[in-house]
């Protein structure tokens, strides 16, 4: 198995999901006591959020690229960023590496296209829904993503940072996410991207008409494919 380098902590809630799913995925594919070889660097999320709010993406890129280099130096053979929003600085991270960097947007787009989806609704942080770095990645793959209206985007942003990233999931928040999903379906979404790695905590399969595409699970599956490629050959 190739060793996976994971840049996490954004938030620790979703990074725990990554670790759990990577190990359970290896066990499911290989059986027995097999588990995933993972090098995890978990950042202080408060520092990253402060850079986001200040719009200092260059400093965020510098810090995460340095972490990526250190993970590679420690033996990582593929590197991934366990968050959607910080893929805004994916290019500098990728440029810092000589090993593959697996983009969460690419893993998501590949799954949507495989299933014949064309107009996914995107639920994510305001950064991801409003800036071009993620939407353009989906469009480049031939998709036509839809995003909620401005009031819903603001409500989703609050729920992510004030609740989900802190491990809080209330019935009211679950109901709100079901409403955001229904609004996107009414606009013509044929699928729904859980485009923040914590949203899978609040919106579950069976709660929407359109199928859910959980970016955390899709990213994990793609990482497992790369890590276990030699096992399949």
Image (cartoon, rainbow, N blue to C red):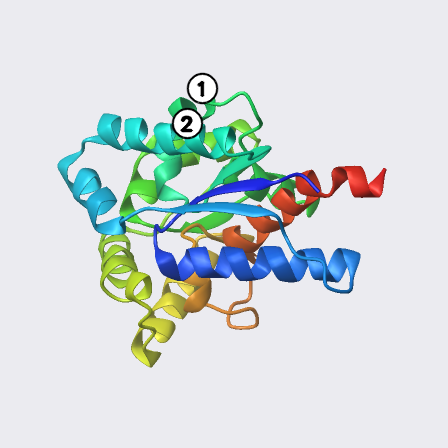
Would residue 86 be seen by someone viewing this image from the given angle?
A: yes
Residue visible at 22% across and 59% down? 158
Q: Could you say where residue 135 lies in the image, as x and y percent from the top left?
A: 42, 35
Residue positioned most to the left: 54
What residue is shown with label 2?
93
* Residue 143 seen from this side: no
Residue 86 or 224: which is nearer the viewer? 224
Residue 221, position as x, y percentages in the image: 64, 49
Mark 2 neighbour class, 10 Å CA radius: few under 14, some 14 to 19, many 20 or more: many
Residue 31 vs residue 203, the one in the foreground: 31
Q: Is residue 51 left or right of residue 194?
A: left
Seen in the picture, residue 107 relative to 179 is either above or below; the reply is above
In the rendered view, tell whether residue 79 sits above or below residue 167: above
Cβ atoms under marks 2 and 1 closer than 8 Å: yes
Residue sitting at x 35%, y 33%: 64
User: Label 1 neighbourhood size at 10 Å, few (<14), some (14-19), many (20+)?
Assistant: few
Q: Which residue lies furthest to the right in this view?
A: 233
Comparing 67 with 210, the one in front is: 67
Q: Is mark 2 on a helix, strand or loop?
A: helix
Displayed quadrant of residue 156: bottom left
What residue did someone put label 1 on? 95
| Image-based side of 96 in relation to 46, left or right | right
Q: Which of 110 and 221 is in front in this view?
A: 221
Q: How far apart are marks 2 and 1 (CA)?
A: 5 Å
On residue 60, which mark appears?
none
Residue visible at 46% across and 41% down? 145
Q: Where is residue 170 in the image (x, y as percent from the top left)?
A: 32, 77
């Amino acid at each position: 198995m190739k060793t996976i380098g994971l840049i996490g902590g954004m938030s620790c809630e979703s990074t725990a999901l990554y670790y759990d799913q990577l190990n359970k995925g290896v066990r499911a594919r290989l059986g027995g006591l097999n588990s995933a070889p993972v090098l995890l660097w978990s950042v202080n999320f408060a520092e990253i959020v402060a850079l986001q709010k200040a719009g200092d993406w260059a400093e965020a890129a510098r810090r995460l690229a340095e972490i990526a280099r250190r993970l590679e130096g420690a033996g990582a053979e593929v590197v991934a960023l366990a968050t959607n929003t910080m893929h805004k600085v994916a290019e500098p991270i990728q440029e810092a590496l000589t090993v593959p960097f697996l983009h969460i947007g690419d893993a998501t787009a590949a799954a949507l296209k495989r299933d014949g989806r064309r107009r996914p609704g995107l639920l994510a942080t305001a950064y991801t829904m409003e800036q071009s770095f993620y939407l353009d990645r989906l469009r480049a793959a031939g998709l036509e993503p839809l995003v909620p209206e401005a009031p819903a985007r603001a409500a989703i942003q609050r729920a992510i940072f004030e609740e989900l990233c802190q491990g809080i999931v209330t019935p009211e928040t679950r109901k709100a996410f079901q409403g955001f999903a229904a609004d996107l379906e009414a606009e013509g979404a044929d699928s729904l991207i859980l485009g923040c790695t914590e949203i899978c905590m609040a919106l579950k399969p069976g709660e929407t008409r359109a199928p859910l595409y959980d970016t955390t699970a899709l990213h994990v599956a793609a990482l497992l494919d790369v890590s276990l490629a030699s096992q399949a050959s």
